[in-house]
Amino acid sequence: MNSGTPSSSAAGAGSADSTAPRRNSKRPKYSRFTQQELPACKPILTPKWVIGTFLLVSVIFIPIGVVSLFASRDVVEIVDRYETDCIPEALRNDKVGFIQSDRSKTCQRTLRVPKNMKQPIYVYYQLDNFYQNHRRYVKSRSDQQLRNNGSLQDTGPCKPEDNTAGGPIVPCGLIAWSLFNDTYGFTRNNQQLNVSKRDISWKSDREHKFGKNVFPRNFQNGTLRGGATLKPNVSLSEQEDLIVWMRTAALPTFRKLYGKIEVDLQRDDFINVTLENNYNTYSFSGKKKLVLSTTSWLGGKNDFVGIAYLTVGGLCFFLALVFLLIYLIKPRQLGDPSYLSWNRNPSGH
Amino acid sequence: MAGWRGSRGGGDGTPSDDRIASSQTVRLGKVQPQAPGHRTVFCNDREANSLAKYKIMGVVNLFMGKRKIRYIHSEVNHIESQMIAWVHDIEVVASWSGDSLQWLLLWIVGLKGALRYHLLGFLLWLRTSEGNSVSTTKYDVFTFLPKGLFEQFRRVANLYFLMISILSCTPVSPVSPITNVLPLSLVLLVSLVKEAWEDWKRFQNDMSINNSNVEVLQDWNWVPTPWKKLQVGDIIRVNQDGFFPADLMFLASTNPDGVCYVETANLDGETNLKIRKAPERTWDFVSPDKVSEFKGEVQCEQPNNSLYTFTGNLIIDKQILPLSPNQLLLRGCSLRNTEYIVGAVIFTGHETKVMMNSMKIPSKRSTLEKKLDKLILALFTVLFCMCLLGSIGSGVFINSKYHYLRFDTSEAQFDPDHRFVVAILTFFTLITLYSPIIPISLYVSVEMIKFIQSTQFINNDLRMYHAESNTPALARTSNLNEELGQVEYIFSDKTGTLTRNLMEFFKCSIGGEVYGTGVSETEIGAAQRTGVKVDAQKRSSAASERGFNFDDARLMRGAWRNEPNPDCCKEFFRCLAICHTVLPEGDESPERIRYQAASPDEAALVVAAKNFGFFFYRRTPTMIYVRESHVDKMGKVQDVPYEILNVLEFNSTRKRQSVVCRYPDGRLVLYCKGADTVIYERLVDGNPDLKRMSREHLEQFGASGLRTLCLAYKNLKPDVYESWNEKYIHAKSALRDREKKLDEVSGHQYSQPNIKKFQVAEQIEKDLILIGCTAIEDKLQEGVPACIETLSRAGIKIWVLTGDKMETAINIAYGSEVACKLINNGMKQFVISSETEAIREVEDKACHTSRRCFSHLGDQIELARYMKELVKNELKSCHEEAQKFLHMDSAPKLALIIDGKCLMYALDPSLRGMLLNFSLNCTAVVCCRVSPLQKAQVTSLVKKGANKITLSIGDGANDVSMIQAAHVGVGISGQEGMQAVMASDFAIAQFRFLTDLLLVHGRWSYHRICKVVTYFFYKNLTFTLTQFWFTFETGFSGQRLYDDWFQSLYNVIFTALPVIIIGLFDKDVSANLSKKYPELYKEGIRNAFFKWRVVATWAFFAIYQSLVLYYFVVASSKRAINSSGKLFGLWDVSTMAFTCVIVTVNLRLLMMCNTLTRWHHISVGGSILFWFIFVFIYSGVALPNKEQENIYFVIYVLMSTIYFYLTLILVPVAALFCDFLYMGVQRWFFPYDYQIVQEIHRHEADTSRIGLLEVGQSQLTPDEVRSYAIMQLPGEKSRHTGFAFDSPGYESFFASQAGVFVPQKAWDVARRASMRSKPKTPRTPRTPRTPQRN
């Protein structure tokens, strides 16, 4: 880059230039690139543009916000937090002891339907303070093993849930090991409400990530049982609870789809929930919630998007007004030379 | 070795004993058997020169140590003798030409398989590869990778990423090694490819040089041979205009007297021809037959890098001939005016002086880059804090209650019992995770941008192309582009920089009488200043020839004979004609001859002598021939040969030049010309009137902006001369310690070695008789005043540092229409001069006490003390006054004028601060009579003391130190020499191109680099902070948010190109507007775009955006995201977040653009598009061996939901909302200057293209056009009018001198009538104007 060796260039010129006459013009050739004259548009952020942009954003955002807020409001959601209530009052001092004991953990809950709910009604469980996104947790799985029958031994990242005396664990790793094992049964007016477990996971997961001919092995055989067991004769790709659970959540508070109720629910229906409160969230004081929710075209109940759109749109509208006002009251003349610093302050510095 | 010599030494003659002796010493283990300062070359005898071997032994010695070397030596000797036998056997001895291939064959045939022979072969290969081939490459095939990588890892950023990469291979890493290895290797790859490409170009260059042919004497014939095959001792022939392939000893030339002419432009840039002279003994070795008989031995110094020294002896037939630089033809020079020369190779390849001279120019780093380091350091601090926070969090978080995480003692990082260990390990985890906060590709991107800026934009700018000298601008380094946009102080040389260095003899003073009627540019300026109108047209009739712009009828065309003291005139002209080192070229006729002079002043003086009738037309090493039109013999032209006995050369320390010559009648005269100060010191006592008047004239000339020289002579008595000459020659011809001996002869003790050399001269250059003085005008360069005005409007302060007299400098600097507009009448001037009455008095006092000024030590000290006190007081009062002005409202601008002597005291550490404080308040500073060293001192005073960004511009060797001292050095190319250009960072052809260089390229570059750097800072901070926020929600485990590949390609692919585009194409205002509003430049001086405030603003927005990016994405994906109630997992959220980051960051870049070319659209659109293409492919393909397929199918899942699109619109808009608001408010209420200018000219198309067609004129105001016109008058008009009717021309002039009849012209009569003195000759030519007499 820098010709730090004058002599080489000198000697180089020696052989090269000797024949070349001096009149060879060294005039640079014209090109738009080298003369830095590429055609360009020069946007200037004039007050009009500022006001216009803000207005434009508000015009687009406010309707989107309204629509998505309405969509969110259409969704009916029943949330029932049960982790404390499902422990007999006498034992609430030692929740961990209770959950680890062999007592019956069945628990009855009654939910009131606040509004008509159209089927399908999605059943979720929500866990709190559960770090599915912990580094140790996230990496503790073997996709190879899940997908491929031949990769049983591929338990590299699964420690400490990788092997038992009887061979490698399938599915291995902490994620599978800690599979959620509370169960819910629903009755309305003593009539069983079927919970469908089909199609609760993403199709791509079922088809590509979990093998059709991979079956559980040595699962939950160890000294410590982390959670639910799997049906030994069902291939992993059909164990949708596991598939849902294995798609780890981004945040420590998360919902997972448990199943679908494919019956409409009427307003003020009472639904009895029979739940098996098996999963230990007590040791880390995690909450457990049961959620029944319909969906809109947009998805579940999430006011955030609508509010965010409305806020941004509203703010832009407000700012557009403010700037418009300033523009009308005290307009800044474009390109007024008196704004130039050396004109404002003639002495220079 | 001895055996080898012995076996072949039969025909070598006498020196063979020597050689055996020296090889004996080798055997004893001495690496350099001969004295270190001494080397022997056997001419015309290849095998005799074993020099290369010693060198290799030296190299081997480095590796193996002495004992092994000794063994190898004996082994090599042994094997060698064996090999010689082999070689004889297979009879290929004769064909041995040093070709390594043949040697290889020899091995295979002769020496089968023995391992030690391989070593020998290697040594031999090394030896044969020595020779004259040169290599300027940095690497070769084997060293490229290790050495290149080593160079790369000297950069802290790369080293950091190397460490991170290593760290990411350990289990603490949350990311796979690819995350950090990939960007690092890409960055390294780019850098290495660049290095390799550059080295390849160098290699090809080397090859073309090494393979060019030269004729070598072989078997009584000249055989064309590639340069690389040349060996020490070879006899070669170089033809006219050919280049010398190695350092040669000059043996013979086709010219008579064994001289040749060389051009040294490649060495020192001086384009004048130099004479070299062969030793008389070898003059006749011209033909191959003759040369083949030549057998000589050269004993000379070891190779060194001093271009101007050489000591050696040539031994022919036991006769010792001293060799000097005069007999040395250096590689890189070319032969001129000589059919061919014959020489013996003395130094080859890397031992040649020019190669020994090739040194790395210390690379400068720009201020912005240094500040960038601080920014990186700040980022490191932020990184450290983030990691610390995270690691504390992890220590707190870790708890066995999270049973599903199975924290136990099996893994140290997840051991709840040792929280401290957990914290420490997590710290490293987090460092790896957050590593993208350090922008790895920043340096390589910035380097690439700057490289393109300098090679494509600056080097190719048509506005900076000077058509007359055919010189485009040249950026010699690409490190300092943006520094050009922040220059606050310019230190400018005067001669050749502000002025054209086109010297014209303008006036003279002979024997106390002023001659010359011209009015200098500066005088016109001065006159206009005072309101007097001067008719500029008057000048037009004066000049007649390049270098001669003199008109005075009293001297011209022989009229000087009628002047009061014609003898003095005669000495004056003779001095001009004899005392110089000019070479005549071309025909020996007055109009066709061309003079080759070291400096244009010299040429101007010789031209002047020619015009006065003392035509110097031929030079031989011993003679100067002058065609004189003699006083005594009227009308006769006489060719007078003067024998030149000694030439005491000019240099900047001596400031004078003397010639001792012998007239044909035997008269011995020393002619001396030099600066007035040095000449006056050496004048003989007496004749005070002449001295006084001449001094007055000198001052008067100086005031007119002219360069003056004093001429003096001295008649020498033969005996005095002889005794001096003996000493002189003795000192000169000493083989060793020449300089020391010269010093002894002189008896002076000087500290600087280059002064020592000339001390002998001191003894004779004394008691001179003053003749008079000359005044040479140096015209201002085109456009200089306008340029200076523009620059000062840009807030740049220009200091003129010149070696000229104070009056000259002030007048050049004075603000008038024609001269530079540095100083004007509105300014308060402070003059600190040593030429005051008070100082003179003290000087005189000192002179009284001892006869010679300044020789008495005590007085000198007293004088120094006095001067210092005086300067101190003066400075103090100036400073106080300046302070007073500073607090006034309508303060006048201040100007300081100081001369070198006072500056010497003012630069004293005790006064330096005051000088600095005061001078920084001045808008203009002129330092006159400063030495090169002082120039550098002043520059570094401002650079270091005031921490301002400085630029030095100069054209000559005396500016080199100043150029190197300043932040940015600019050389004026295409004129005096190349030293300044060689030392500079940028070279331009004209001073006025500084406006383009600074205001356009510098400013743009500064803007662009600032944008690039701050944008890099922003995008990496934003990206990393989203990661950081996520850490809080993962139990501080260091779980990565993004996929490995996303993270690794973020910097090098998804956001790499647009930022380079902005670094190349962003343009706030057009080039023309940059120059029309030079004040815009002040933003750069204030560093308005890379202050901590700017960085903090960016940091604030980075934090804001990262919060929006992370939390908005997370919050909008908490619930079911489609009508089938499904949910996003971690990787869905992260991919969505990453998409938002890519879009946001790229859109932010568009927002900061001032201009949008199609490249902006392509690069920004392309980056976003590429991300989608990448993620489609990446998530669509299941890699067979990957353990975790987190991203598999994610993007398709995402894109099947409406949420994704809603978020993709919402998040970037919300993230950029604040930035947009800020930009709108900033522009509306607190606009930058460039923004106003943009607005003023918002409706104008970019007109620069039209302007380009008439570069030079288009940007000028009417005033400037007029001043241009005035400046161009003399040159332009004279060319047409001068010969047409004004002057009779030389032919008639010399014809008349020769007695040939020339018809008289009417105005001759008119002129004679107006002459004061009686015209003695009717042929005296004159001008139509009435001569102006003072």
Image (cartoon, rainbow, N blue to C red):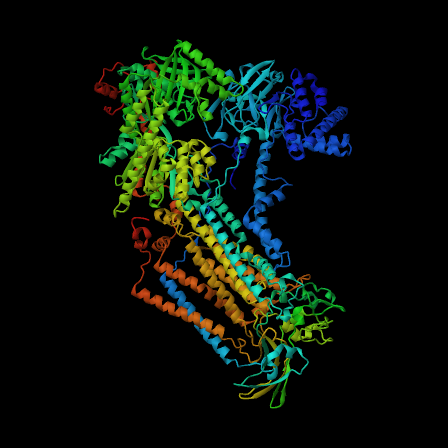
Q: Position of residue B352 (x, y in %)?
A: 56, 28
Residue at 40% x, 35% y: name it.
Answer: B935
- The foreground one among B234 and B931 is B931
Question: Residue B115's spot in the image, x, y percent?
Answer: 75, 34
Left/right of residue B1306 with respect to residue B65 in the rendered view: left
Outermost residue to the bottom: A189
> Residue B871, position in %: x, y?
32, 34
Q: Position of residue B883 (x, y in %)?
A: 29, 44
When the figure is inspected, residue B1235 is found, relative to residue B245, above or below; the finding is below
Where's the N terminus of chain B, which quadrant?
A: top right
Instruction: Count the marks.
Output: 0
Give the camera-side residue of B1329 and B303: B303
Q: Is residue A88 visible?
A: no
Residue B425: image quadrant is: bottom right
- Location of residue B287 (image quadrant): top right
For the C terminus of chain B, give its image quadrant: top left
Judge whether B1234 appears above or below A51 on screen: above
| x 76%, y 32%: residue | B108
**Looking at the image, residue B154 lies above or below residue B288:** below
Asked whether, in this view, residue B18 is left or right of residue B379, the answer is: right
* Residue B496 visible at all: yes
- Decide: is B501 above or below A165: above
